[in-house]
Amino acid sequence: MKYAAWLIIAFCALLLQGRISVLGVPPDLTVLIAFYAGIRYGEHKGLFAGLLIGFVEDSLSNSMIGPNMLSKGLVGYVAAFFISGGLFRWTPLLGIFSVSILTFFDSVIAVLLKTLFDKRPGTVAAIVFISVMQSLLNALAGAFMRPEHVD
Amino acid sequence: MVRKKALLLIVIIAALVLMTYQGKKGKLESLTSLDTLLHATQNVVSSATGSFMRPFRTMTLREEENIRLRNRIAELLLEQSAQQEAVLENKRLKDLLKLRETHRTSVASARVISRGIGYWEHTLVLDKGLEDGVGKDMTVITPLGLAGKIISVAKSYATMLLISDINFSAAVRTRESRLEGVVSGAGSRNCILKYMPYEDEVKPGDVIVTSGLDAFFSQGIPVGYVSKVDTKGIGGNFQYIEISPFQDAAKIEEVLIIR
């Protein structure tokens, strides 16, 4: 049941991503799934959730398979460290900050990998604009994504 | 902890190997069945949104007479807006029809369902596919000019690569002076006109059309106009020329697919 819910959420995220945009920039909703899996279920599940959703995203976007897969996998993995309760005490503000930073991190890794193995996906100005916009659009969601120990 | 780090390392190495492989052998195929399911849902959502939103808006304005009157006004305004929308749509479709009549090689006219999934790729999903005769590498145009090309086709959907994507390129020439070059997407609104030597005189405002020399795009399709020329050397051995496409990628609603 839990896995079915995750699948539906991932499907809806992919569906919404193609339909909504702010100033021409669509939000990166799939990174939120990887982030949530990381802070909720730890490094392993965060990594695998990120890898899986990134793989689907890469595959559906008619581009090279790998950049989103690895960047989202890393986000899932790193998210578990970020709010594990050991290093930081979770607050909504920390949630906003961490989602924002990790969305930006995801964009940077994906762009670096695309540039290394394929082509740079746009001008530097366009890349910076999209990355910053996406981290701002995702930021608020961080206030509502709590690690298990906070509940 | 060591196992976790080892797993992460394995994943990173595997992903790097996968990307290196694709870099040498070409990109892997997409998940066609999931792709079709997603686009079918997008099509349903697209049609349902319009019919769902209208009654939802009117339901909130029904209790008092005043509200009913306002509601009536709102309805009339909505109708007016819908009629205006229909008039505009009618005009666009007429233009498209005219374009279809002038292009004997036209395959199908299509509606845009959604943007592509990847935000770094400039793609659009169209509601026509193999069933309608659409094939890979076909040209996509609008009444304003070149819009892109088809990069993948499913049974009833197709994905088009926009002219602004970095992977897009087409052989072009300037309409007046007949100078040849290649237009490429830059990942932003404007495109780049490549391979124009410094001795060729290109001015802002020059109209660019397809030359047909690449065997993908037929000759004479309007692409855009020169918006910036830099001859100070930032383009290396060639001039750095920016093109503003006639068709703004953000405003595409209906397109014509031609051979």
Image: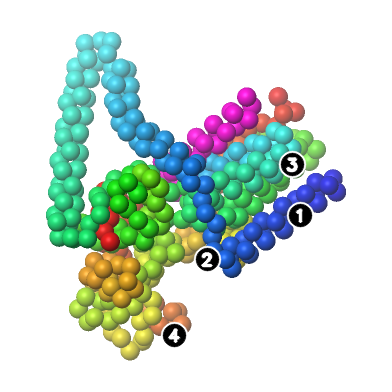
Judged left or right of residue B104, residue A150 is: right
Crowdedness of circle 4 by 10 Å Cα count: few (<14), some, many (20+)?
few
Marks 3, 1: nearer the viewer: 1
| Residue type at tag 2 | Lys
Give the residue number, with chain letter if any, for mark 2. A119
Q: Is A14 included in the stretch rendered in magenta?
A: yes
Contact? badges 4 and 1 (CB < 8 Å): no
- For the residues labelled 3 and 1, the Cα–Cα distance comes to 13 Å
Give the residue number, with chain letter if any, for mark 1. B9
Q: Chain of mark 4?
A: B
| Residue type at tag 1 | Leu
Residue lying at the far right in this picture: please name it: B2
Q: Earlier in the sequence, mark 4 or mark 1?
A: 1
Marks 4, 2: nearer the viewer: 2
Marks 4, 1: nearer the viewer: 1
Q: Chain of mark 2?
A: A
- For the residues labelled 4 and 2, the Cα–Cα distance comes to 21 Å
Judged left or right of residue B204, residue A72 is: right
Give the residue number, with chain letter if any, for mark 4. B237
- For the residues labelled 3 and 4, the Cα–Cα distance comes to 49 Å
